[in-house]
Amino acid sequence: MRAYRRTILHIGRASSERAIMRGRAVAHIKPHIGDKKLNEITDDTLNDLYRMLESAPCPTNKGKPLGAKSVRHVHNILSGALGAAVPKLIPSNPAATANPPTGREIRAQERDFPTLDDGGTTRFLSSVWEPRGNRACDGGLTHHCLRDAPLWTVYAATGVRRSEALGMKWSLINWDEGSIELGWVVVEEGNAYRLRKLTKDGDANALIYVDQSVMNVLKWQRARKEVEREHLGAVWTDHDLVFARDGFKLYRGEAGGPQDPEKVSARWRTLRNRLHLPDDFRIHDWRHSKVTNDLEAGENPVEVSANVRHHSPGYTMARYGHSRKNGARKLAASGANRLGLSSLV
């Protein structure tokens, strides 16, 4: 009987291997059912928890209730934790008969992210490469107004994630082939950030291909970094990073190391406001724009999916295919013409 006195939180810690899972368990499970004995947990207990998380203000979500997708994550954690206790501690897994948010409910809450079409992207890139001539500018390669222009260009042209661009390394660029290995990312951890190997979805050293014009932008960036390194001397510590921290307002840390992702996002928000882009347009929405525009242009979905490292073309089409109205109309017209439908009536 002593075994049955173990709590759901104890089992959750034993079965959770990732820090993010433990964090969710502490934030969304522990305050509500963390002290319950395993044999007290029923499917009704879990259903009450899910409905409460969907409706009550959540401190970790800016005071708003959790979305259906987040509640489903909580269910998955509980299901794994409770499943680990079967059959030694409890006869069956109550999560198996609980009612978490369904896939349809999750999809219904997914919002359409803002995107820029190719014309808007062209105008954006022209603006970010135009020097503004403020006090910090010297007119050369270290021109302050252009310090982020290569970074914004890479986001817009490739659709890489924020963390992947900040983790790009010179040694992983194949200049002749026109390819870049994404082997590293810069990630936030609490109030800190660090450089680590890319492990998302088991994707190690993912390879993307870029046009020579993007390679030229990276060559410009490399020349700029060489000037910056020579200027800073011993202050610079080389980490092989393409978009390394530079010497501007170097209050702490070391030049040459990884940039703070949140500060990059803060600079993005400033630029977004200056260029009057949609208020909710995030760095990640360059990724949505890239995929949407490629599909709208009729590019091969298999290649589009591969170059943004989606797990399958089916996912890409399910997530983005609904926006391809023009392409769908062209396909319908082409099929009708081939069949001679216009001559029937």
Image (cartoon, grey):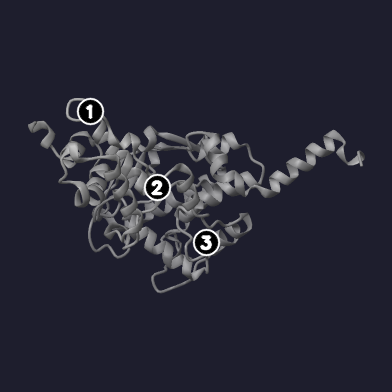
Outermost top residue: 87
Left or right of 261, for residue 110: right
Looking at the rendered structure, the secondary structure element under dot 2 is: helix
Residue 233 in percent (x, y) is at 27, 54
Residue ID at (53%, 41%): 210
Left or right of 81: which side holds 213?
right
The disc label shown at residue 69, or none: 2
Residue 73 visible in the snapshot:
yes
Three-letter amino acid code at the position of disc 1: Pro
**Relative image position of residue 262 (x, y in whole percent):** 33, 58
The quadrant in which the C terminus is found is: top right
The residue that disc 1 covers is 91
- Residue at 84% x, 38% y: name it: 337
Is 334 left, or right, of 317 in this rendering? Answer: right
Residue at image mark 3? 129
Residue drawn at x 58%, y 34% is 302
Where disc 1 sits, the SS reads loop
Please state which amino acid type lies under the numbered disc 2: Lys
Q: Nearer the viewer, residue 70 or 146?
A: 70
Q: Position of residue 116 (x, y in %)?
A: 57, 57
**Residue type highlighted by circle 3:** Trp
Residue 236 position (above or below residue 215): below
Q: Looking at the image, is mark 3 or mark 2 nearer the viewer?
A: 2
